[in-house]
Amino acid sequence: MLRIAGGTVYDPANGVDGIVTDLFVDDGRIVQPAATVAVDRTIDATGMIVMPGGVDVHTHVAGGALNFARGLVPENQRAARKFLHAGDRRAGLGGMTPTTFATGYLYAGMGWTTVNEAAVPILSARHTHEELHDIPLVDKTSLVLMANNEFVLDLLEAGEAERARDVVAWLVWAAKAYGIKAVNPGGVEAWKWGKNANTLHAPIEGYGKVTPAQIIESLAEIADALQLPHPVHLHCNNLGVPGNFETTIETMKVLQGHRAHLAHLQFHAYGGSDWGSMRSESARVAEALITNRNLTADAGAVLFGDAVTITADGPWQHLLYQLTGRKWGNLDVENETGCGIVPYVYKDRNLVNAVQWAVGLELLLLIDDPWRIFLTTDHPNGGCFWRYPEIIQMLMNREFRREEIRKLPEMARQRILLADLDREYTLSEIAIITSAGPARSLGLSRKGHLGAGADADVTIYPAKPDHGFLFSYPRYVLKGGTIVVEEGEVRDVATGREFIVRPACDDAIEDYIRPLFERFYTMSFANYPVEIERLRHPEVVNLPRHP
Amino acid sequence: MITLTLGDAPAVPLEAEVLSPDTIAPLSLEEIRALPVFLGKRQRRVADFFAVDGESGDVVEVHGDLRRVKWIGRGMSRGVLRVRGDAGMHLGSAMTGGSIEVSGDAGDWLGAEMSGGMIRVRGSAGGQVGAAYRGALSGMKDGTIVIDGSAGLEVGMRMKRGTIVVGGPVRDFAGLQMKGGTIVLRSGAELRAGAWMNRGTIISLAPIPLLPTFSYAATYNPTFLRLYARRLATFGCAIPFDERDGAYRRYTGDAAVPGRGEILVWQPRS
Amino acid sequence: MQPRIADTFAEAFDMSAARVVITAQSPRWARIAAESMTGFATSVIGCKVEAGIEVDLTPNETPDGRPGVSVLLFAFDAGGLGQRLVDRVGQSVLTCPTTACFDGLPEAHERVAVGGLLRHFGDRYQSSKFLDGRRYWRIPVMEGEFLVQESFGVQRAIGGGNLLILARDQAAALSAAEAASDAMRSVGVILPFPGGIVRSGSKVGARHYKKMVASTNDAYCPTLRGRADVTSALPDEVNAVLEIVVDGLDREAIERALRAGIGAASRPGVVEITAGNYGGKLGKHHFHLKDLTS
């Protein structure tokens, strides 16, 4: 048994708010101390801060799109942080699109222990799982792209809701995923015709009836019906476009009565009517989120500096390419979805980027319930995940935030409200937005807290006044009870598991899918579903039949 | 002067960017021997491969069959580096000053992305001389590379400034996506010289095949070439410029970009 | 009989100077461009710049290995000098067949744009080459290309060094002045006036016309000797005076020139050699004639 002695524990899920107490770890779990079990190691955590390991609810770290991005920016790879092969550490590259082993070392090195790969096409899910397996030291979940899947859209068009539910169930298991991702519903389908889906209630290209709103509502219903632990995870229509806050608020209306999680909300909270008049509408969006208690969101905050945008939102990425005039990658995933990749630099002298930077922070500060808004940068779209500590610093330190605001162009300061926001996050609130909240939203009951029975994913920080520094360099990180970071040294001594769901599904649905597949896909049906044997450390959550 | 002599040629590439005047000049012989080099993925010591002798200074001489020794002179900013033998890839990559001399051949990526200094190769070089590494916006930003022998593909690819002179023939895509600077081809080139050229000058002293997107402009003796000729004469390279000896046919391109580069092809007076 | 050397000094001023090296296909065309460029440049008062040919240059001495001429220009400030360079190179060198134009003060820290502004004549068809830390513009012209360096150096210099040759008659004055002018031309100096000689030496302001900047130096005008309202500085035997003005890059160059000029002007018919000054109140560079004859 391992004892973490005398640390100041923040476990908001269990009401523990900065109490000096001991924690006990045995067999990979947090346990109550038992007199019969000897303590064979003690970590002296006196004066240190103990939190549950970080949970990243939305990131892009593995799979075909990521790998395409890695190849698109070799100049970034050359400049990236190098992880040299040594002893128990594999080689890798950090930077904006870290390689697999480096991804694990970077997350664990920062104190994060669970990671949700937010966008997986079924067709290349096998590749995603291979890469996820190669990410050490963290547990993983992944979400399969569904909102532009032609089998599903065709069924929605035909009004066959039940069959659509069964097809989705079958596809989720075929992909060996944990949940459903919806990206620009209808828009990526329209992109196959060079178009987009900008209006929630207008039929999408190629269809007579199906609208983005209908796709959203149907997928939310399906997620509820299948009792997925995590609700439908939605990247709204009109991402990035000035004035899109209206689409976001309308989307929330469409979702009423259903659970949902809104991804990278920052990119969906803009006012104005064009790039020249773009402004923050974070207040309206925050208010709407607070009112719709069925919804959670993650921030998708932007940080100044280099980024690589990688999303399934093909038409948006093409627009971004036209704005930058430099590199662009576009992938079509037959019958299912798409992907666009555009390297981008956020500059503090750029008016639009300055507004974006402010909006992410505004949402985090305005939404006062930390259980509803989580810390992400939509890595690597808004900024690299290993820069989360910079955001934490700005949330906790009002003066530092104000200094950063002073660097913005004068005109930008008139388009944002950040300077008027006084709130400073407490450590407990930080523990919620980085761990307890995302874990609860993902339905991972053994993550995000330090109560008995929880996975022993624990991060121990030195207490330092500069909070950004504090969060950059944990003194210890435990993953499933194994010390994987000690005195700042990362040790590759633990593999993570992959959580996947098996929705209840009528097997007969395969008879419906197979002939369609064989007619419209370019691969053989037998090769389509990912075999469970491909996942070397799966933890399957079998879901009950819908009532 | 410090002398390093390679014993047996390594079986796999040896990465030895520590072999540069900047790194070596301030060190004692013992410290030099202890410098790290990478044999494949394993870290070793300079002394495992080289005999080290001499007195500290910023002249470094390396002897041996160094064809598999990469990154010699990487990023150097001063001093003199002499290779007595053949050198491996990435010789003088990203250097900013000082000079490198090779008695034999050099590998690919000679002087890639350099921004100052001088490289002289008595033998031949590989491809991507003074070029941009994949994905980077520009190749060499300044400096001079003189190769007495021939060179390979993509000589001066995306170079922005500086001068490359090649005595022997070069292969395809010399000056690919060139942004500036000057390439002198004393023995001409194979195909597609100047492809996607934006700016800069390719001077060929022998006839070369030209892309259809290059247009003939005029036959003349540009004055600026006299400045180059004088400068290159200091390295023992002569280029013709006098109207009594001939003239240059000027071709502008690459219209596919559209670029404002030029290819000057020498036409001797018959 | 050797002329008297007056115990006085020439008073000269701080100026800014630039050197332009003009090359061409032949010495003839380099000279033509230089003469055109340095025309109407006798005094800053009326011409805004003082300019003249310094020396001829052999092919070995020029950047492009062709025959050339070096020209010096003097003005009161670097900005003004820069504008004069653009005007004169643009109108007289750019326009002249086979020329190229280079900076002759490469060590000077202060720089002014010349090719950097003239390049616009190329209407976006121009290009540049960067060699050894300097940019050269190639401006497409009907004859081919005009090569001009982007920036030219400007340095502190001295203007207004002078000698006054007091002779028995006009012929003797001219003969002495011509000999002095020939002897004084050397590296580092120019004689901006026609043939190097001023026949109408001036004084600051005027006695009778309020607004004049300069007027005839009545103390040295032979026909005004004897008038009650003129205090003549002329000895009785003097019937003609000619002045030589010299601008130079530094003190040594002017001293050398003045010394050579005094020597060459010391010939029969010359009564006295003197120099003009303002009591030492206006210019800070003083050249005492006695120091130049030892």
Image: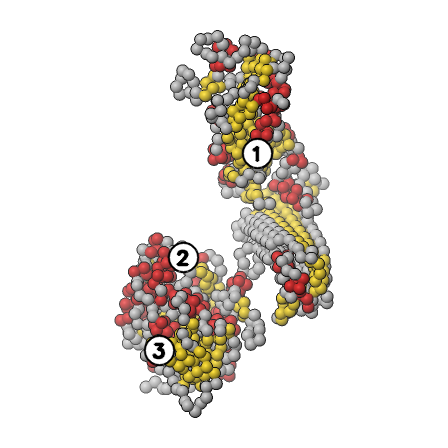
Quarter residue C33 falls in: top right
Q: Which of A158 and A140 is in front in this view?
A: A140
- The secondary structure type at the circle numbered 1 is strand
Whether residue C253 sits left or right of residue A162 in the image: it is: right
Marks 3 & 2 on one chain = yes
Whether residue B59 sits left or right of residue A314 in the image: it is: right
Judged by depth in the image, the label closer to the viewer, 1 or 3, is: 3
**Tag 3 subunit:** A
Q: What residue type is labelled 3?
A: Ile
Q: Is residue A411 above or below residue A199?
A: above
At horizontal 40% and vertical 21% (from top left) the residue drawn is C211
Asked if one can make out residue A173 in the rendered structure from this viewpoint, the answer is no
Circles 1 and 3: CB distance less than 8 Å?
no
Q: What is the spatial separation of the Cα atoms under label 2 and label 1, in whole angstroms? A: 46 Å
Q: Name the residue under label 1.
A: C20
Q: What is the spatial separation of the Cα atoms under label 3 and label 2, in whole angstroms? A: 40 Å
At horizontal 48% and vertical 22% (from top left) the residue drawn is C278
Q: Where is residue A152 in the image (x, y as percent from the top left)?
A: 39, 76
At horizontal 46% and vertical 75% (from top left) the residue drawn is A476
Quarter residue B158 falls in: bottom right
Q: Which quadrant does the N terminus of chain A fall into?
A: bottom left
Q: How crowded is mark 1: few (under 14 residues within 10 Å), some or many (20 or more)?
A: many
Q: Position of residue C103 (x, y in %)?
A: 57, 37
Q: What residue type is labelled 1?
A: Val
At horizontal 35% and vertical 78% (from top left) the residue drawn is A19
Q: What residue type is labelled 2?
A: Asp
Judged by depth in the image, the label closer to the viewer, 3 or 2, is: 3
Q: Position of residue B106 (x, y in %)?
A: 68, 58
Q: Name the residue under label 2.
A: A348
Q: Which mark is residue A19?
A: 3
- The secondary structure type at the circle numbered 3 is strand
- The secondary structure type at the circle numbered 2 is loop
